[in-house]
Image: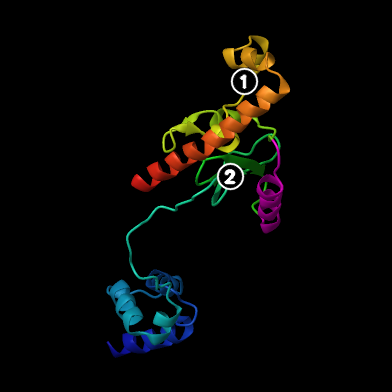
Amino acid sequence: MMKRFKLWKKLISKFVVLTKSRPKLHLRIKRMGCYWSTMVKDCIDYAKRCQACQFHANLIHQPPESLHATVASWSFDAWGLDVVGPMTKSSGGHLYTLAAIDYFSKWAEAVPLKKVKKENVVDFIRTNIIYRYGVPRIGEALWAYRTTIRTPTQSTSYALVYGVEAVLPLEQQIPSLRIAIQKGLIEEENARIRLEEFEALDEKRLEVQQGSNVT
């Protein structure tokens, strides 16, 4: 017993500063060729009493509280960023996808990345969020996402941003009713209708916001 205690004190003096968790402590001791039947229990008990272990432990200091949804009152008011990967390497050598979604309209932006670096994320935010203007050049995947009705908003992301549904390429080849009507309008009538659509957009966005607060 005395021999084990001396060995224990000697080992602890080496690892107390380096060790952040009790599993690592007993694994380090095992790697040195030492073992006794109550090793794991002794490591746990020591970590509870060790002042240095408590200082360096990965403790959660945030007080517990109920989960709450992030509320955005307007389009592009708040964004969510996430990195997906690593995935199977593409032909271009990309392993990750960096995606950003607007909390209000569910509008999405995404780019493939070979490596996740600070410079890549900053460039993505600058190019695809801050400096974006006009109608973006939408890729096939994002086009499908933005023109599909989202369950939380009961609307398409495109309509919540621009006030009208996106014009599909097929509507240009086989004119739909709205395309046929628009072609017969003069400039003043088209401007008036567009203004009415923008006025209705405020009401639609307000309905989406109220629906989000209820759910």
Q: Position of residue 211 (x, y in %)?
A: 38, 42
Q: Is residue 123 magenta?
A: yes
Mark seen at residue 201: none
Q: Which residue is mark 2?
A: 99
- First in sequence, mark 2 or 1: give its number: 2
Viewer-proximal residue among 151 and 165: 165
Q: Tell me the magenta residue range.
A: 117-134
What amino acid type should be assigned to the residue bearing mark 2? Answer: Ala
Residue 176 drawn above or below residue 66: above
Q: Quadrant of residue 159?
A: top right
Query: Is 110 on the left or on the right of 209, as rendered?
Result: right
Residue 127 position within the rendered picture, expressed as x and y whole percent measured from the top left:
71, 47
Crowd class of label 1 (few under 14; some 14 to 19; many from 20; radius 10 Å): few
Name the side, left or right, on which 189 lies relative to 75. right
Horizontal side of 117 relative to 1 (left or right) equals: right
For label 2, the crowd category at 10 Å Cα-Cα, with few meaning under 14, some 14 to 19 and many 20 or more, is some
Whether pointer 2 and pointer 1 mark residues with C-beta atoms closer than 8 Å, the reply is no
Q: Residue at x 68, y 55 (%)?
A: 122
Q: Is residue 196 above or below residue 25?
A: above
- Residue holding disc 1: 168
Secondary structure beneath disc 1? loop
**Which numbered mark, 2 or 1, is in the foreground of this view?**
1
**Element class at badge 2:** strand
| Residue at screen point 66% across, 23% down | 189
